[in-house]
């Protein structure tokens, strides 16, 4: 009987630790928007490497996360919703770029503040965007000597 009780207590402890790790991972991943946040929208040519929960950074510091992504069927651009900290007010001429942490690193959305005295309001849109740059495309251009295949002589 005491062996069964020890097994039940051990199982309960393992389950409690697993639930604690799951809760910690959920909070740290940014899947839930940070409390005290507001949303901005941005339209990108490409969001390759970006998923819901991806970091939004300013000067290398995480200031928010991507909370929604969808394709605009009219423009064929990827529309993203960025959830940012309330204490961060961006000038209206700020830019949003899809950047990479390195050659093999992950992607994130980088904010580059502008110089306008007017700030973007909550729910507003960042109009200056730059989508993801395909490493494969860059390598093909480098390997091909920068020539476009249509320009090459037969």
Image: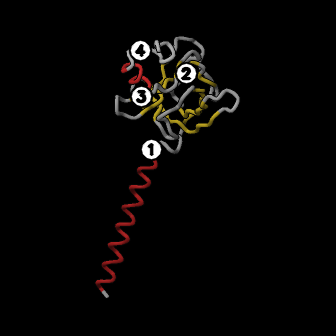
User: Given this view, does label 2 or label 4 mark the residue nearer the observer?
Assistant: 4
The quadrant holding residue 129 is top right
Alpha carbons under labels 1 and 3: distance apart: 28 Å
Q: Is residue 24 left or right of residue 84?
A: left
Where does label 1 land, which residue? 29
Looking at the picture, does residue 119 appear above or below residue 8?
above
- Please give the name of the residue rendered at 41% of the width and 23% of the height, measured from the top-left corner: 140
User: Given this view, does label 2 or label 3 mark the residue nearer the observer?
Assistant: 3
* Between discs 1 and 4, the one toward the N terminus: 1
Secondary structure of the residue carrying tag 3 is helix
Q: Is residue 140 left or right of residue 47?
A: left
Where does label 4 land, which residue? 146
User: Given this view, does label 1 or label 4 mark the residue nearer the observer?
Assistant: 4
Image coordinates for residue 81, horizontal then vertical, percent: 59, 33
Looking at the picture, does residue 107 appear above or below residue 59?
below
Q: Quadrant of the N terminus?
A: bottom left
Looking at the picture, does residue 117 appear above or below residue 60?
above
Where does label 2 land, which residue? 129
Please give the label number shown on residue 154: none
- Please give the name of the residue rendered at 62% of the width and 37% of the height, measured from the top-left corner: 70
- Please give the name of the residue rendered at 42% of the width and 44% of the height, measured from the top-left corner: 28
Image coordinates for residue 126, horizontal then vertical, percent: 59, 22
Secondary structure of the residue carrying tag 4 is loop
* Between discs 2 and 4, the one toward the N terminus: 2
Alpha carbons under labels 4 and 3: distance apart: 13 Å
* Between discs 1 and 3, the one toward the N terminus: 1
Alpha carbons under labels 1 and 2: distance apart: 24 Å
Residue sticking out furthest to the front: 154
Alpha carbons under labels 2 and 3: distance apart: 21 Å
Question: In terms of depth relative to the viewer, which is nearer, 140 or 52?
Answer: 140
Please give the label number shown on residue 136: 3
């Amino acid at each position: 009987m005491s062996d069964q009780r020890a097994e039940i207590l051990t199982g309960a402890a393992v389950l409690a630790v697993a639930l604690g790790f799951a809760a910690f991972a959920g909070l740290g991943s940014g899947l839930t928007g940070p409390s005290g946040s507001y949303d901005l929208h941005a339209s990108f040519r490409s969001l390759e490497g970006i998923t819901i929960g991806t970091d939004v950074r300013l000067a290398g510091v995480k200031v928010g996360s991507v909370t929604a992504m969808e394709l605009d069927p009219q423009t064929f651009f990827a529309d993203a919703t960025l959830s940012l900290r309330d204490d961060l007010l961006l000038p209206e001429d700020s830019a949003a770029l899809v950047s990479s942490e390195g050659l093999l690193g992950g992607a994130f959305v980088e904010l580059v503040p502008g110089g306008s005295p007017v700030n973007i309001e909550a729910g507003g849109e960042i109009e200056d965007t730059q989508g993801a740059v395909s490493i494969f495309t860059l390598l093909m251009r480098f390997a091909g000597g920068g020539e476009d295949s249509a320009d090459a002589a037969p």
